[in-house]
Amino acid sequence: MVMRWLLVDRSRAPLRAKAALTLGVLVLAILGSGCPCMHGAVNASPGLRWWLFANFGASKICPEMLKRGMGLHLQDRGPTVGRFFPAQCSVDVNGDRNTITVNFAGTGYAFTTLTRRVGFSTVASVEYRPDFYLGEQDIYVWGRVNRVINGPSFRLGYVENPVADVATAITPLGAVANLFGNQIVTGELTQGFTVVQSTSKGTDFTLGTLNPPLKPHHPFDVSHSEFFTFANEITEIRANQMDFLGPFEVVSNGQYLLMTSSLDGPALDIMIVDKITGDAWREAYQTGRPIAPPPGPILQGGVLNPGPSQLRYPLGPGRYYVVVDNSPYIGMVAPRGFVIPGLPEAVARLSYVAQLAE
């Protein structure tokens, strides 16, 4: 059993007693060999679990958190209605309290029927009490919220609602928009997290805490797939809106991004751009600039028609956004862009799984 998040990094290991270091290396060696003889001892020892996590797991949190955007939902198992993209992250380890504090900041966008598209930024410091459980096939890693130290400081920026500028106006509508947006972001980011690593199915992540043998819920069953899964979710793209999936990382030559999807609703444009282009494009979208072509080249793309599909995108090493568009301003699809209040609008519901294949 290979524990990726417990890789030994001697350059970061604190100066511990030689006996403790020897014990830790021995435990890691036995766990890495797949021997179940240590599972019971580790599971029964909170002190040993904390020592392993603090020395070999805590440093993995920020790199993972900064890799991709985080979907925001109005209800459990509901479709994604927006995304938060962490831009800054640091971790403080408190050995006296056996806790870690994750300090993060970032920006994002969301959609509500009241405000339509909104852009926001948030800063927070959340203290987690981490733990893990070693099973014969799966490793469960939990980050349970212990307390919110700072924030989340939620700042609403651009608001699309054509009736009023609820971002700055002191009106009942503005108060509702801020409250609702705050509930979306804080509700997602302060419920803790679960990481499940399986010897046969790879690593999976979900917000909230799941106990064995429960697994994160996804629209596609990829339990028998040999490919690495980036994302497996349902997202709604309203009329005149976009969604920025990823960014997803291609590690080496010969690999490709595999998008398996099922679309209910109008056809969408799908475009692949590199991370630099995607970040700038997303920033423009979040801050309310008119929807326009990206500030850089579209590397690959086409039309995503209703129904099931599977698309392959050969790409060189790098990080890439998959951008889906439901507006008449870019791409080849030109849906009705004007939304008449009170009448149904063209909502696209996209179930997809993004994987790295070779």
Image (spheres, rainbow, N blue to C red):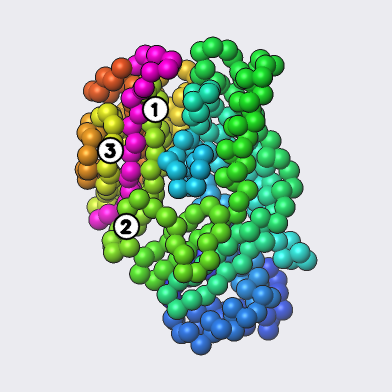
Say whether disc 1 or disc 3 marks the residue closer to the N-terminus.
1
The answer to whether the residue labelled 1 contacts the one labelled 3, judged by CB atoms less than 8 Å apart, is no
> Real-space Cα distance between discs 2 and 1?
26 Å
Looking at the image, is 9 positioned above or below residue 86?
below
> Pointer 3: what residue?
263
Residue 305: percent from the left, percent from the top? 22, 33
The answer to whether the residue labelled 2 contacts the one labelled 3, judged by CB atoms less than 8 Å apart, is no
Position of 226 with respect to 34 (left or right) is: left
Looking at the image, is 317 positioned above or below residue 60?
above
Measuring 50% from the left and 83% from the top, which residue is drawn there?
Answer: 30
Which quadrant holds residue 330?
Answer: top left
**Quadrant placement of the N terminus:** bottom left
Q: Secondary structure at mark 2?
A: loop
- Quick one: which residue is furthest to the right in this view? 96
Q: Nearer the viewer, residue 141 or 92?
A: 141
Q: Which mark is residue 238?
A: 1
Measuring 65% from the left and 51% from the top, which residue is drawn there?
Answer: 102
Q: Which mark is residue 221?
A: 2
Q: Secondary structure at mark 1?
A: loop
Position of 104 with respect to 299 (left or right) is: right
Q: Which residues are magenta?
A: 337-358
> Real-space Cα distance between discs 1 and 3?
13 Å
